[in-house]
Image: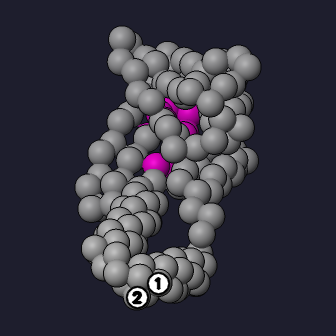
Amino acid sequence: MTSVETQPDTGGEDEPPLLLNARLRPNRSLSPRGFVILMTIVCTVSFVGGLAFFLSGAWPVVGFLGFDVLLIFLAFRINYRDGRNYETLCMTRRELEVTKVNYHGKVRRWLFQPAWLQVDIDNPVEHNSMLTLRSHGRSLIIGSFLTPEERAEVANAISNALMRARRAEI
């Protein structure tokens, strides 16, 4: 789920005001309770099907049905693990700090100067459109896990914060 919030320019002398404070997270539509219910249904269907095949003499099919259940379980576990990734965007008049944290907790940070920053995204935004930040020959793709509408929303929030940062420098 995407959370984008902009804050007014009310920072004190010691701390620069935040123009943008956003945390981007992948959306996981299936809750842990829903996962348990889904896996219960999958296991029940596989057990009943496997029992029917076993009683009709096709016992090797039982192994394949069990393997299917294992693969479905592993796919959801990987999906939930990747759901722990997130990105944060914090912009002041002086810099935009992008922080990416993966599911292991490994943190990577990039700093951009708002005066030189460009926000690139296709218009109209399509499914494979990437939100790219460019400055001084460097580029960084952010929000790749977001829906196209969410990427457009984030691009607009960054652009608005950039406009406010550039107005403050004049």
- Helix, strand or loop at label 1? It is helix
For label 1, the residue is 52
Direction from residue 78 to residue 116 in the image, left or right: right
Pick the front one: 25 or 82: 82
Give the main secondary structure, helix, strand or loop, of the magenta stretch.
strand
Seen at 29% across and 52% down, the residue is 107
**Residue 166 x/y as whole percent:** 63, 22
> Which quadrant is the C terminus positioned in?
top right
Pick the front one: 163 or 61: 61
Residue kind at label 1, given as amino acid type = Ala
Q: Residue 170 carries which label?
A: none
Q: In this view, does 154 lie above or below 74?
A: above
User: Picture quarter containing residue 104?
Assistant: bottom left
Q: What residue span does the magenta drawing correspond to?
A: 87-97
| Residue at mark 2 to residue at mark 1: CA–CA distance | 5 Å
For label 2, the residue is 55
Magenta segment: does it hold 122?
Answer: no
User: Picture quarter containing residue 111?
Assistant: top left
- Helix, strand or loop at label 2? It is helix
Q: How crowded is mark 2: few (under 14 residues within 10 Å), some or many (20 or more)?
A: few
